[in-house]
Image (cartoon, rainbow, N blue to C red):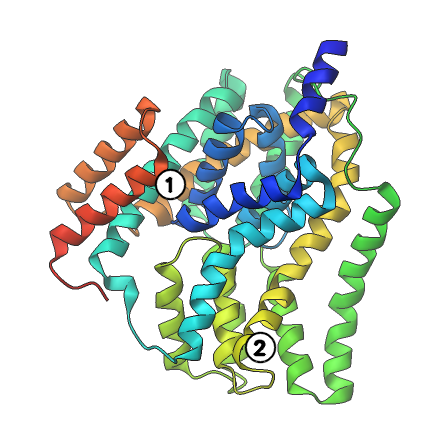
């Protein structure tokens, strides 16, 4: 037990600068949306850097999938917080978010109307994401569904997720997996880091959860009382980040309602920004930075982009930092670990469903695409080729197959 505690402590030690550089690497190379990001994160933080083990990573994935907001960004914040405290969580978000936010604010400043989404190299990046997600699903399935009861939960979750595509399906399946695990599955061994202390004090966690709900109520009231479009836009961005489960593309209707429906952003600007967002790495929620930059509501420009960026990601910080102290305690209880075992199995099924739709269906349209995905998957599986090299090769292949058009 003493050796395990020492090993856990060694994994936890780190600096915010170290976390920032690791997250920046991911922010520059992680294409493909939140599901693909989980694959990139696992490769970087579990396999390459060994900051946490497979079981702890799966626990955090389950936590982030259960909370509203940008799941991949929340996962990064949680890992960074575990590595270097609150400063590490902030550094993880900054590194992962700044590259795409900077590009999108720059595009907004120049009011660019390019359609990057149909460029050949972007198609190649989508194919790389298919391979990354496929490998992540296979590896997590092998680890989290080692027996037939858990495989049955995963398969059932996969089938339901494919048949019933509503914003609440994911949350319902996670809850069902937890119930099945609690009732029928054996409790996995207690985590090796049982002696670790939560990087977030319990009282601070409770205060942050309270602040999350307080802002959810107070911001609409403030917008109505003041009549300020700036407050209303901040409230809309905060609400978009606070009320969407699954993150990624699910947030688009709320962002459209917040900006276009109010006349602050034109529909053509919205679509152009969305196309550009598809062509940059990092979280899709950085689309808010583009919208804040081109908005007719002051502050626009760089300040508007940064304000919208903070507003949409603020709920992620409040929820992750608020729940981590409780999460660290709960996952040590036998009854909770049984439920968590079922939750993890359901998450495997959800990731498998996402691998098919939208990752596969939105990327693969020909036998040549299939061949590129298989080749990329083979390269990744060898573990001898860095993911960024595989991503670059897929981008080149996609460009060569579609002709000279770059933008």
> Is residue 267 shown to the viewer in this render?
yes
Residue 264 position within the rendered picture, expressed as x and y whole percent measured from the top left: 52, 85
Residue depicted at 43% across the width and 65% down the height: 103
Residue 280 disc label:
none
Compared across the picture, whether 285 is left or right of 278 comes to right
Point out the image quarter for the C terminus.
bottom left
* Alpha-carbon span between mark 2 and mark 1: 35 Å
Quadrant of the image occupied by residue 174: top right
**In the rendered picture of this protein, how many numbered marks are placed on residues?**
2
Residue depicted at 11% across the width and 58% down the height: 403
Residue 8 position within the rendered picture, expressed as x and y whole percent measured from the top left: 69, 21
Compared across the picture, whether 41 is left or right of 389 comes to right
Which residue lies under the disc numbered 1? 355
Depth order, front residue of 327/382? 382
Which residue lies under the disc numbered 2? 304
Quadrant of the image occupied by residue 130: top left
Label 1: how many residues lie within 10 Å, few (<14), some (14-19) or many (20+)? many
Q: Nearer the viewer, mark 2 or mark 1?
A: 2
Residue 167 position within the rendered picture, expressed as x and y whole percent measured from the top left: 53, 55
Image vertical order of residue 9 relative to residue 113, above or below: above
Of pointers 2 and 1, the one earlier in the residue sequence? 2
Compared across the picture, whether 378 is left or right of 4 comes to left
Q: Secondary structure at mark 1?
A: helix
Image vertical order of residue 340 relative to residue 214, above or below: above
Depth order, front residue of 43/183? 43
Image vertical order of residue 112 relative to residue 15, above or below: below
> Is residue 250 shown to the viewer in this render?
no
Residue 398 position within the rendered picture, expressed as x and y whole percent measured from the top left: 19, 50
Q: Secondary structure at mark 2?
A: helix
Point out the image quarter for the N terminus.
top right
Label 2: how many residues lie within 10 Å, few (<14), some (14-19) or many (20+)? many
Residue depicted at 66% across the width and 51% down the height: 90
């Amino acid at each position: 037990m003493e050796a395990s505690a020492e090993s856990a402590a060694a994994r936890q030690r780190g600096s915010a600068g170290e976390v920032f550089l690791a997250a920046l690497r991911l922010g520059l190379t992680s294409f493909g949306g939140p599901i693909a990001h989980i694959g990139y994160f696992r490769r970087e933080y579990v396999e390459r850097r060994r900051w946490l083990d497979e079981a702890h990573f799966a626990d955090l994935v389950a936590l982030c999938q259960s909370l509203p907001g940008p799941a991949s960004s929340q996962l990064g914040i949680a890992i960074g917080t575990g590595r270097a405290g609150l400063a590490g969580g902030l550094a993880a978000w900054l590194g992962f978010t700044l590259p795409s936010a900077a590009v999108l604010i720059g595009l907004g400043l120049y009011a660019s109307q390019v359609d990057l989404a149909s460029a050949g190299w972007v198609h190649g990046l989508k194919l790389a994401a298919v391979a990354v997600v496929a490998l992540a699903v296979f590896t997590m399935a092998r680890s989290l569904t080692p027996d037939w009861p858990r495989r049955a939960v995963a398969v059932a979750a996969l089938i339901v997720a494919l048949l019933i595509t509503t914003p609440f399906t994911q949350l319902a399946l996670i809850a069902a997996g937890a119930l099945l695990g609690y009732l029928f599955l054996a409790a996995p061994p207690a985590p090796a880091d049982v002696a670790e202390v939560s990087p977030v004090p319990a009282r601070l966690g409770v205060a942050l959860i309270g602040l999350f709900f307080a802002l959810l109520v107070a911001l609409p009231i403030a917008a109505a009382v003041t009549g300020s479009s700036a407050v209303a836009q901040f409230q809309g961005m905060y609400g978009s980040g606070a009320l969407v489960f699954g993150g990624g593309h699910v947030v688009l209707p709320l962002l459209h309602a917040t900006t276009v429906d109010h006349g602050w952003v034109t529909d053509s600007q919205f679509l152009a920004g969305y196309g550009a967002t598809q062509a940059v790495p990092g979280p899709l929620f950085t689309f808010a930075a583009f919208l804040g930059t081109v908005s007719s509501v002051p502050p626009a420009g760089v300040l508007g982009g940064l304000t919208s960026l903070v507003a949409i990601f603020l709920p992620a910080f409040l929820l992750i930092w608020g729940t981590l102290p409780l999460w660290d305690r709960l996952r040590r209880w036998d009854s909770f670990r049984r439920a968590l075992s079922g939750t993890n199995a359901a998450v495997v099924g959800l990731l498998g469903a996402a691998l098919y739709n939208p990752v596969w269906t939105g990327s693969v349209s020909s036998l040549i695409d299939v061949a590129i995905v298989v080749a990329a998957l083979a390269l990744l599986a060898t573990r001898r080729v860095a993911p960024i090299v595989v991503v670059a090769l897929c981008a080149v292949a996609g460009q060569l197959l579609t002709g000279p058009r770059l933008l």
